[in-house]
C-alpha cells in the first residue's frame, strides 16, 4: 500500500467531509499547509500525527481575485484563525465576509477538487 503524503491525506479527508491537519506532539501546534513544519518547530513533519479540527474561527484577512465570467468569475480567498490556534486559507463567496467575522469552515467538494470553504456564522463581537 502506498503511503499518502500530507497534502493528499488533507485532500482525502476534505473529500470525506472532514477537516484534518497535521499536529506536532512535540510543540503542540498544528501545521498548515500540510507537509510544512509547525511554526518554529524542530520536529520532522513526517512524525506529526493527524487530528481533526472543528473548523470554527475568525477572519484574519481576505481578498478577492477578479476573474472574467468565462474564467469562473470572482474568487474570494480568506485567512482564518481557527480556535485550535492555526491560521488556514479557504475560499469564500465574495461580499459575504469581513475581517473579524466568525466563520465555520466546511469541506467544499463542488469545486474542481476538495477545498476549504468559509461560511459566516455570526460576528466575532456578538
Image (tube, grey):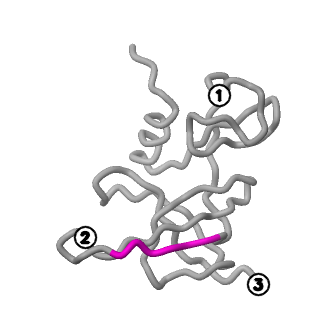
Using a 10 Å C-alpha cutoff, classify the residue at mark 1 as few (fewer than 14 neighbours), some (14 to 19) or many (20 or more): some
Residue 9 x, y percent position in the rendering: 47, 34
Measured along the vertical axis of the image, is residue 70 above or below residue 40?
A: below
Q: Quadrant of the N terminus?
A: top left
Residue that carries the numbered disc 1 in the rendered image: 45
Q: CA distance from mark 3 to mark 1?
A: 36 Å
Residue that carries the numbered disc 3 in the rendered image: 125
Report the magenta residues as a range.
Answer: 61-66
Query: Is residue 64 on the magenta stretch?
Result: yes
Q: Earlier in the sequence, mark 2 or mark 1?
A: 1
Q: Earlier in the sequence, mark 2 or mark 3?
A: 2
Image quadrant of residue 43?
A: top right
Left or right of 44 on screen, residue 2: left
Label 3 or label 1, whichever lies nearer to me, is 1
Q: CA distance from mark 2 to mark 1?
A: 35 Å
Q: Earlier in the sequence, mark 3 or mark 1?
A: 1
Using a 10 Å C-alpha cutoff, classify the residue at mark 3 as few (fewer than 14 neighbours), some (14 to 19) or many (20 or more): few
Q: Residue at x 48, y 37 (%)?
A: 7
Residue 65 x, y percent position in the rendering: 40, 72
Residue 44 x, y percent position in the rendering: 68, 23
Q: Residue at x 54, y 49 (%)?
A: 19
Question: Is disc 3 placed on a helix, strand or loop?
Answer: loop
Residue that carries the numbered disc 2 in the rendered image: 72
Q: Quadrant of the C terminus?
A: bottom right
Residue 22 x, y percent position in the rendering: 63, 37
Amino acid at each position: 500500500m502506498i503511503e499518502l503524503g500530507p497534502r493528499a491525506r488533507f485532500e482525502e479527508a476534505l473529500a470525506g467531509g472532514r477537516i484534518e491537519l497535521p499536529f506536532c506532539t512535540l510543540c503542540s501546534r498544528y501545521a498548515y499547509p500540510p507537509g510544512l513544519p509547525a511554526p518554529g518547530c524542530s520536529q520532522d513533519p513526517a512524525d506529526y500525527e493527524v487530528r481533526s479540527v472543528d473548523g470554527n474561527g475568525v477572519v484574519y484577512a481576505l481578498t478577492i481575485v477578479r476573474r472574467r465570467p468565462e474564467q469562473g468569475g470572482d474568487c474570494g480567498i480568506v485567512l482564518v484563525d481557527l480556535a485550535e490556534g492555526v491560521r488556514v486559507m479557504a475560499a469564500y463567496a465574495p461580499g459575504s465576509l469581513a475581517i473579524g467575522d466568525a466563520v465555520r469552515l466546511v469541506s467544499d467538494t463542488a469545486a474542481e477538487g476538495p477545498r476549504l470553504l468559509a461560511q459566516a456564522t455570526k460576528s466575532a463581537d456578538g
